[in-house]
Amino acid sequence: MTIATLRQLLDAATAGHHAVAGLVVLGWEDALAFAEAADEAGQPIVLQAGPGSRRHTPLAVLGPMFRHLAEQARVPVACHIDHATTLEECRAGIDHGFTSVMIDGSALPLDENIALTRSVVEVAAPAGVSVEGEVGFVGYAGGRASAFTTPADAARFAAETGVDALAISVGNVHLQTETSDGIDLDALGAIEAVTTLPLVLHGGSGIDPAVRRMLSRQHRVKKFNVGTEIRQAFGASVRATLARHPHSFDRLEILRPTIAAQREAALRVIRNLGPG
């Protein structure tokens, strides 16, 4: 299947009144599981290389790996850099074959965030690469607290940057291990009233699947980033394997069962967000 850009997937999701899953990849087993799940569901996905993934594995490896899986898949797959914080990181992602980059200037003052994001768009657009930006700040469970996205900032950011997708903070939180009902629908609606871009919610693992489905159909949220939820399936698989085989030391023997475990977890996410 043709490798897709993020904007292509989000436009299709918008037309179909559903959303796509942005799945966080930390290694080969994860990426393979996600590609297999997408094929089984018959729905597109976004393979995402976040900061942890990039610290562990060079972009020169991740880019071709993602593209290989995307080329073998029967559904569209976008290859995405998540939470880059510099123009140089985004440029490197583009050079190594990623079809989408997320520039995260959310820790900067708004003017600086806009300027940084616009500089990435100016590099990415001629290369046919999508850009996701963030305004407001999505916090972390047990870490820095969120700062909600204001409608005025969202409207200005969207108008002045030229991004293809807008990540916002409306009660979603990174790294939550249990779901909550924290999404502020009034805050979301106020942002939707002054923007037209597809919206992205990071911290999708902390949002109840029923709420994710509702938001994808009744609102303009067209991508949910999901990592923790699937990593929990990975961890459970490793613990179960070692419990059954306490003397096992072979990496492949220990990690092979995680592919099926993550495939099933990803499949539930993909189907929940997809049409039907």
Image (cartoon, rainbow, N blue to C red):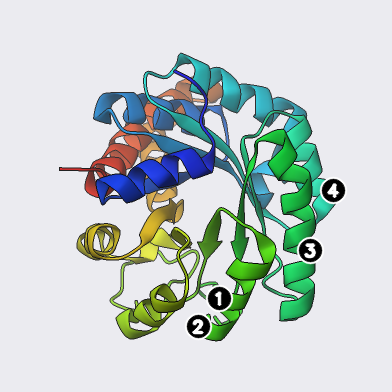
Give x and y (percent) for residue 49: 61, 42
| Residue 81 image-quadrant placement | top right
Which of disc 3 and disc 4 is earlier in sequence?
A: 4
Instruction: Measure the C-alpha gap from mark 4 to mark 1.
Output: 25 Å
Which of disc 2 and disc 3 is earlier in sequence?
A: 3
Q: Identify the residue position indicated by label 3 in the image.
A: 116
Mark 4 falls on what kind of element? helix
Q: Residue furthest top?
A: 72
Give x and y (percent) for residue 176: 43, 67
Q: Are marks 1 and 3 in contact (CB under 8 Å)?
A: no
| Residue 102 visible somewhere in the drawing | yes
Q: Identify the residue position indicated by label 2 in the image.
A: 151
At horizontal 20% and vertical 61% (from top left) the residue drawn is 210
Mark 2 falls on what kind of element? helix
Q: Identify the residue position indicated by label 1 in the image.
A: 154
Q: Which mark is residue 88?
A: 4
Residue type pointed to by label 4: Glu
